[in-house]
Image (cartoon, grey):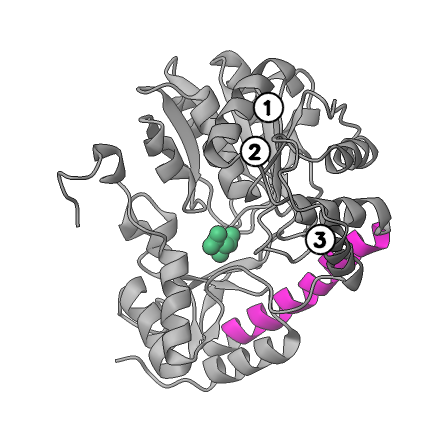
Amino acid sequence: MTSNRTARRTHNFTESVIRGMTRLATQHGAINLAQGFPNFATPDLIKHAAAEAIHADINQYAITWGSKRLRNVLAARYQEWYGMNVDPEVDLTVTCGATEAMATVLLAIVNPGDEVVVLEPFYENYGPDAILCEATPVFVPLRPGEPLDLDRLGAACSAKTRAIIINTPNNPAGRVLSRAELEGIAELSQRYDAYVVTDEIYEHILYEGEHIPVATLPGMRERTITISGASKTFSVTGWRIGWIISPPDVGGAIRKVHDFLTVGAPAPLQEGIAVALEQLPNSYYEGLSTDYRHRRDLLCGALVQAGFAVVPPEGAYYVLADFTGLSDLGDVAYSEWLTTEVGVAPVPGSSFYNDRALGRGLIRFAFCKTEDLLEEAAHRLIGMGSST
Ligand code: GLN
């Protein structure tokens, strides 16, 4: 419902479908494969570090752009992992999750009337974030299992393009952008003098290819704004710790917006993440992909057995499943039926497309769950009856 008592900028997007499906799953006691949050614990080391920080009275505001300890270790890790030069005093801003990071970045760089290119299917925040900046999102397809059509991306860019948003590994399609695709995006951003805003929250959850931060491509550090966070890497989605790495001349605007939106991210939890980044060995990050690969294979195998068509994701922890061989229902009705009658909640595919018809035969499952829960979901899906 829209009302003239509310600002027009709120009229052109809806509330999150993902979180709505979580509420439906809870109401019906269904297994929640809708919202992407793990049902398993973060390592003890991280829990203890945050609890210790609370007991050590690190309970007041951290520095607005992030605790020095966290910024320092982040700069060290980006250097070690990707050879990226990050000045923790200028280039880094710690935020309340990657969600705040994306909104803050766009508010800091996008003017009303600008255009923001979004690859589709997309994570549901990007369009509303652009609309909150009174900019126009422009959509370009990036389908599971298909290469990015760079000609089509080029045709969507113009002098009005302020930013190209990418998300690799991608939610919901599981695509990992290749070097050639990233080079194509980089070339277009240079040609149209646009920023690349890159959401790399799934950077450590990878099954195929390699994770290449676009900021590491030649000439791209100064026009790329990199977003990532602790939620997925350390299974702490409720802590709301994310970060932004920006070129030096944009950091000031980003930090101002962040300051007036949130003041800062939770101080003791920043310490917990700093300890994780300082102490966890590289094998932790490798183990993440290994464990998620098992879960991916378990769920994708079950989906195929149940009659869905899937392209196994190359990264991240979601799979888009085509259910048109199983039901004539639309994606919303089918998601509700699966939740209430089968006891497994997905997200309707249309929430990831601007032209909702493109998602009508698709639903998204998250597999960031323990194997026993995935096996139970698999059992229910394989054994389900007909929806009609
Ligand atoms: N990124 C997760 C998803 O796509 C969680 C979204 C959210 O609720 N913030 O499900």
Three-letter amino acid code at the position of disc 1: Thr
Expressed as whole percent of the image width and height from the top left, the position of residue 179 reads 66, 32
Q: Residues within 10 Å of mark 2 (few under 14, many from 20)?
A: many
Please state if 20 lies on the left or on the right of 290 as rendered: left
Q: Residues within 10 Å of mark 1 (few under 14, many from 20)?
A: many
| Residue under numbered circle 3 | 54
Q: Earlier in the sequence, mark 3 or mark 1?
A: 3
Expressed as whole percent of the image width and height from the top left, the position of residue 276 reads 78, 50
Question: In the picture shown, does residue 7 fall above or below 356?
Answer: above
| Residue under numbered circle 2 | 198
Q: Nearer the viewer, residue 44 or 312?
A: 44
Magenta range? 282-304
Residue 148 visible in this rendered orientation of the protein = no
Asked whether disc 2 touches disc 1, contact meaning CB atoms under 8 Å apart, the reply is: yes
Q: Nearer the viewer, residue 313 or 307?
A: 313
Which element carries disc 3, helix, strand or loop?
helix
Q: Quadrant of residue 321?
A: bottom left
Would residue 300 be counted in the magenta stretch? yes
Would residue 108 be counted in the magenta stretch? no
Please state if 4 lies on the left or on the right of 339 as rendered: left
Label 2, label 1: how many angstroms apart (C-alpha)? 7 Å
| Residue under numbered circle 1 | 224
Asked whether disc 3 touches disc 1, contact meaning CB atoms under 8 Å apart, the reply is: no
Please state if 341 lies on the left or on the right of 183 as rendered: left
Expressed as whole percent of the image width and height from the top left, the position of residue 338 reads 37, 75
Ligand 1 within 8 angstroms of badge 2 C-beta: no
Three-letter amino acid code at the position of disc 3: Ile
Q: Earlier in the sequence, mark 2 or mark 1?
A: 2
